[in-house]
Image (cartoon, rainbow, N blue to C red):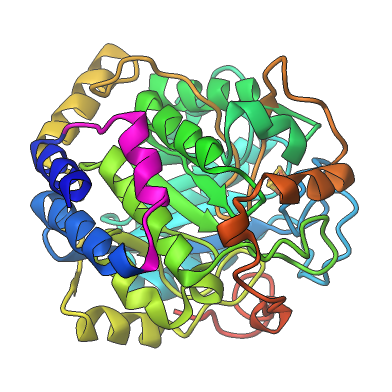
Amino acid sequence: MDLLDTLTAKGLRGEVPTREEALAVLATTDDELLDVVAAAGKVRRRWFGRRVKLNYLVNLKSGLCPEDCSYCSQRLGSKAEILKYTWLKPDQAAEAARAGVAGGAKRVCLVASGRGPTDRDIDRVTDTMAAIKDADPEVEICVCLGLLSDNQAERLKAAGADAYNHNLNTSEGTYGDIATTHTYADRVDTVQKAHGAGLSACSGLIAGMGESDEDLVDVVFALRELGSDSVPVNFLIPFEGTPLAKEWNLTPQRCLRILAMVRFVNPDTEVRIAGGREVHLRSMQPLGLHIANSIFLGDYLTSEGQAGQTDLDMIKDAGFEVEGAGEATLPRHRADVAEAAQAGGGCGTAASACGSGGGCGPCGGHAHAPSSSAAQASSDSSAAQASPAAPAAESSGDELRSDLVKVRRRGAGTELAPNA
Ligand code: SF4
């Protein structure tokens, strides 16, 4: 197949495909799917071998958010029966982090709900990072606190943070359909602030919110231009009690095509299968490992994942290996660019156009100001508007599977042991 030969050759050289080629990946048929996975797998192995990076989420503060991200169970007005609690104490967070590291996680992701941190919140997270690094100095820490104000990224960097997560989530053109309390431009600004402070940028997307193929390609190219070092690909978890509860638009095949497209556009970037892996890929999860080089271990922020040991068994059975603490995640040429950017205080990827949004992690996030064409629709109406945008061939692939969404009841914020 000419398309896949072209994409493979470009990916092996670290080149980005054209927008048309990226769209063509999303338009492939089920008969072509294994060829698509194999082609993306060659690119994945070129830059990341058979390593799988494990990341572990610690939800420092859950629920009760004033923002209105329509996909998020922690949003303003959410009726989802999730855990709700305020800031964990540093020792509580460190205990949860230890479980993830003991389970094989190389990176701990500290996430808090909310529009953005106060300076007092930065102090709390500083103390939490110290407690975690006291126990394990090698662990990578990524922080996800929402929109950053001036100098907060510098404070996090000085306190030992390695990375900052803020997702773009969707295209600039549709951002106003999924959140109205912040904008796409707000998100871009935060990622730029993190990058400018020398933090590794983690920024990704959510698929399955009713977006078009063009929207997906737009956001993935924006992430490439932004210089994200890691791209979490979330598949919408349609929580009961949120405006997108009925948005079951994804099939396992669609998820694999999306992952492959993200890999081809970001050949040498960490691509992470994030929230929704178990819910939407289901028995096809091992095929996702041939494309992505990173996953979350165990549970998510507000929903439960499969058992941590099941993740480890899946990795081994599929012929992959867990990336060790001493191994570099990114290829050397990407690490060099990142180091140069940090030294220069700017963002640095092959694409110098830094600056798309940010947002909070696997749950969704803060957005920016939508483009002028994007209506500031309410979250509730956005759910209704989203469906018609979904490609007809894919939009009805899954029946309602709310039985697959299990609210997290263990780990951080509970008396029960974390799942790792
Ligand atoms: S994604 Fe983040 S900012 Fe948006 S509602 Fe959820 S916790 Fe709040």
- Look at 73% across and 43% down and name the residue there: 114
22 inside magenta stretch: yes
Q: Is residue 4 left or right of residue 198?
A: left
Q: How many marks?
A: 0
Going 64% across and 26% down the picture, which residue do you hit?
173
Residue 406 appears in which quarter of the rendering? bottom right
Task: Give the quadrant of residue 415.
Answer: bottom right
Q: Which residues are magenta?
A: 15-30
Image quarter in which the C terminus is found:
bottom left
Q: Tell me if residue 20 is in the magenta stretch.
A: yes
Q: Residue at x 37, y 15 (%)?
A: 353
Q: Is residue 162 visible?
A: no
Residue 360: x and y in percent read 60, 44
Q: How far across and down, in percent of the image, does residue 293 sit?
A: 27, 59
Q: Residue at x 11, y 59 (%)?
A: 49
Q: Quadrant of residue 133?
A: bottom left
Residue 50 percent across, percent down from the top left: 14, 65
Task: Confirm whether residue 391 shows in the render.
Answer: yes
How far across and how far down the image is residue 259, in percent?
38, 55
Q: Where is 81 relative to 175, above or below?
A: below
The one nearer the camera, 199 or 365, is 365
Q: Is 273 left or right of 119, judged from the image as shown?
A: left
- 312 to the left or right of 88: left
Query: Viewer-proximal residue, 210 or 231?
Result: 210
Looking at the image, which is closer to me, 288 or 48? Answer: 288
